Image (spheres, rainbow, N blue to C red):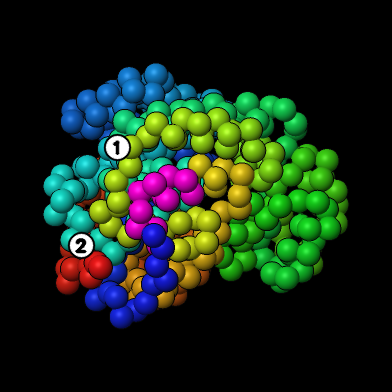
């Protein structure tokens, strides 16, 4: 079931967001692992995923954790375990949260955080998602380039002209073009006016038709995943709509692998809700940076290290103190 949001539905709005691939940096997990509870939970999710996430999050270099099959499980596990550090009693936290959202693979983090799927299901799904997307990317040399600035219509026209896909629409002044390396080279040789191009450190053209093989694989696995209706509003990358049905949320997450991420529409939904605070789970910074440009006047909090947890909890209390109005 979907709903169009309305300001009348909300009194206070705290939105918690989870970043997507590219947010990871070497060693970002190190300070978090000083907490024995965090380390134990990461070890458990590493076991579920069959990947030594602790080693990758502490010792691996940038090139190693750039690999899709490593980056995606690492990001989801970190977000889920950090959420428990932030809110040790999730049932109490749900009364304060207006909505959750995740960018690309962050949607899996958000769905598990909202209890639509379990943490263990999330780790199996993201492991298989990462592997399948890496395999799909290996079939054809593809990539992604961020287009910063420019006139929106002109940017989109230039992307279309070169046969590329606007794979991420991240709001004002930031669209990510994706396609073959040949197409991206031609695009770079003839960029849109007043725009700056920045090639991204990713392994393929995610959220395009090049990822269709990965969709099929994950869709087959998803048939065996039991879902629950989200405990808080879940904003979908597909169109910015609020998804209140767990099975629908999972279907959308699977399909999103080969469809553009409409983060701009997610931001529109947050604005329509009257959002007052956005807290980004670690490794944070990307989505709060976008929010500062797109949602003027909305307070943001980028949770990067555990020494920020007390301040982050105060941020949650400040923006969720009147209680979210759920239907």
Residue designated by label 1: 118
Residue numbers of the magenta segment: 242-252
- In the image, taking residue 313 as reference, residue 59 lies left or right, namely right
Q: Residues within 10 Å of mark 1 (few under 14, many from 20)?
A: some
Separation of marks 1 and 2 at Cα, in angstroms: 21 Å
Q: What residue is rendered at 35% in x and 53% in y?
A: 245
Q: Residues within 10 Å of mark 2 (few under 14, many from 20)?
A: many
- Would residue 26 be visible to someone looking at this image? no
In the image, residue 50 sits, relative to residue 145, either above or below, namely above
Q: Secondary structure at mark 2?
A: loop
- The image quadrant of residue 97 is bottom left
Q: What residue is rendered at 47% in x and 38% in y?
A: 24
Looking at the image, tell me whether mark 1 or mark 2 is earlier in sequence order.
Answer: 2
Name the dominant secondary structure of the magenta segment.
helix
Residue 320 spot, x, y in % from top left: 21, 66
Residue 11 spot, x, y in % from top left: 24, 76
Label ID, residue 96 = 2
Looking at the rendered image, the disc whose residue lies closer to the viewer, 1 or 2, is 1
């Amino acid at each position: 079931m979907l709903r169009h949001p309305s300001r009348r539905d909300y009194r206070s709005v705290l939105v918690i967001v989870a970043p997507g691939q590219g947010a990871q940096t070497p060693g970002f997990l190190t300070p978090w692992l000083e907490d024995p509870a965090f380390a134990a939970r990461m070890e458990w999710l590493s076991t579920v995923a069959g990947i030594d996430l602790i080693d990758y999050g502490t010792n691996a270099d940038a090139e190693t954790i750039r690999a899709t099959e490593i980056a995606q499980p690492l990001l989801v596990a970190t977000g889920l375990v950090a959420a428990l550090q932030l809110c040790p009693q999730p049932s109490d936290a749900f009364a304060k949260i207006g909505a959750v959202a995740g960018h690309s693979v962050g949607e899996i983090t958000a769905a598990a955080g909202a209890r639509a799927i379990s943490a263990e299901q999330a780790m199996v799904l993201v492991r298989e998602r990462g592997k399948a997307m890496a395999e799909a990317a290996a079939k054809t040399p593809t990539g992604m380039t961020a287009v910063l600035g420019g006139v929106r219509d002109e940017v989109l026209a230039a992307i279309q002209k070169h046969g590329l896909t606007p794979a991420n629409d991240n709001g004002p002044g930031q669209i990510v073009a994706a396609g073959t390396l040949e197409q991206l080279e031609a695009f770079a040789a003839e960029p849109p006016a007043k725009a700056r191009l920045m090639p991204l450190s990713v392994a393929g053209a995610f959220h395009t038709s090049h990822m269709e093989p990965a969709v099929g694989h994950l869709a087959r696995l998803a048939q065996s995943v039991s879902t629950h209706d989200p405990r808080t509003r879940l904003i979908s990358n597909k169109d910015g709509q609020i998804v209140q049905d767990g099975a629908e949320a999972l279907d959308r997450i699977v399909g999103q692998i080969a469809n553009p991420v409409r983060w701009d529409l997610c931001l529109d939904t947050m604005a329509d809700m009257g959002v007052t605070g956005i807290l980004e789970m670690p490794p944070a910074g990307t989505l709060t940076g976008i929010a500062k440009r797109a949602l003027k006047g909305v307070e943001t909090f980028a949770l990067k290290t555990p020494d920020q947890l007390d301040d982050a909890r105060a941020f949650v209390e400040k923006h969720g103190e009147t209680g979210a109005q759920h239907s």
